[in-house]
Amino acid sequence: MKFDWNKYDEKPLSRRNTLQIFITNACNLRCDGCFARNVMGEEGIHMSMEEYKKVLSEFLEKGGEQINLIGGEPLLHPKLKEILDLNKLNNIKTTIYTNGYFLDRFSREDFEGVKIRVSLYCKSGGVKSVSKLPKFNIPIEICFMVSRGNSVDELIESANYIEENYDCNVFFISSIRELDNDRKEFFDDTEISMNVLKYKELVHKFLDLYNGKMEVHVSKRGVFESTKTVADCKCRFANYFIGGKIIQCPYDVVNMKFQDGYEFGCRNCQQNNSCLMSKIVLIRRRKNE
Ligand code: SF4
Ligand code: SF4
């Protein structure tokens, strides 16, 4: 499959020591492809501030740089503001992963210096559809999780709609898809997984047809090789769940392979090109470049 490098430039990336913290089990939705579906546990439990402070202090000792707040729906955590203030005070970069349904309850100022990544599944009709997103004046990034039913037209229409109606400069394409290796143990318990070759075809078609101004980020697992970013074989990622459970690699979340602890930059990873966290960032070239 030919990729038009005349249309895009790739931005080099570096990895930060990142902890993904599941701050709440509460969620207003029950999505088929939910990343956390096996670890959600009892409904409506929020992480206490006492626990959050402890996690943060251990994270800082380990050289942590970035925290991803996730759940459940992290905007439902009653002490979210306090959490964001604590992160800011400790110079931690924060990204919130949200379904976006409650963003109209917040203001731009609430998320100063925080990245909000809104996850969407489709253009209209189902849960997490672009058309169900409330109106708000908060800068966001979109993460469109493509699954079996999505078409390239739907992806293009969604990107154009988002660009016209929201303060968004990143359209991140990721997917609920099969693994491209023999283990195939990831997300094979849902009917909606997209075949990896179909995903590759869809992404290429999108990149060919998309004419908007947003950066296009693509989860590249088995789809692209980066031409700029040197593979880092040390893992810089871990997940922390309410109550102290830890799983370093997101691949192990579905299978609940809990660990005793985590360290950054120590664990060797053999599946770097297929790391769930790796992506490629593409920026449209201006006409005369
Ligand atoms: S909104 Fe997110 S946390 Fe909630 S069920 Fe859907 S995928 Fe899971
Ligand atoms: S795939 Fe490797 S680098 Fe990526 S999170 Fe898992 S262990 Fe870490």
Image (cartoon, rainbow, N blue to C red):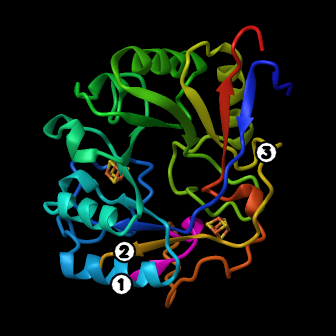
Residue 101: percent from left, percent from top: 24, 38
Residue at which label 1 appears: 244
Residue 248: percent from left, percent from top: 55, 75
Q: Is residue 252 left or right of residue 283?
A: left
Sequence-first disc among 2 and 3: 3
Please rate how many residues cluster around mark 1, counting C-alpha atoms within 10 Å: few if below 14, some from 14 to 19, many from 20.
few
Please rate how many residues cluster around mark 3, counting C-alpha atoms within 10 Å: few if below 14, some from 14 to 19, many from 20.
some
Q: Residue at x 65, y 53 (%)?
A: 278
Amino acid carrying label 2: it is Phe
Amino acid carrying label 1: it is Gly
Could you tell me which quadrant the N terminus lies in? top right
**Mark 1 falls on what kind of element?**
loop
Report the span colored magenta.
243-253
Q: Are marks 2 and 1 in contact (CB under 8 Å)?
A: yes
Residue at which label 3 appears: 226
Residue at which label 2 appears: 241
**Mark 2 falls on what kind of element?**
strand
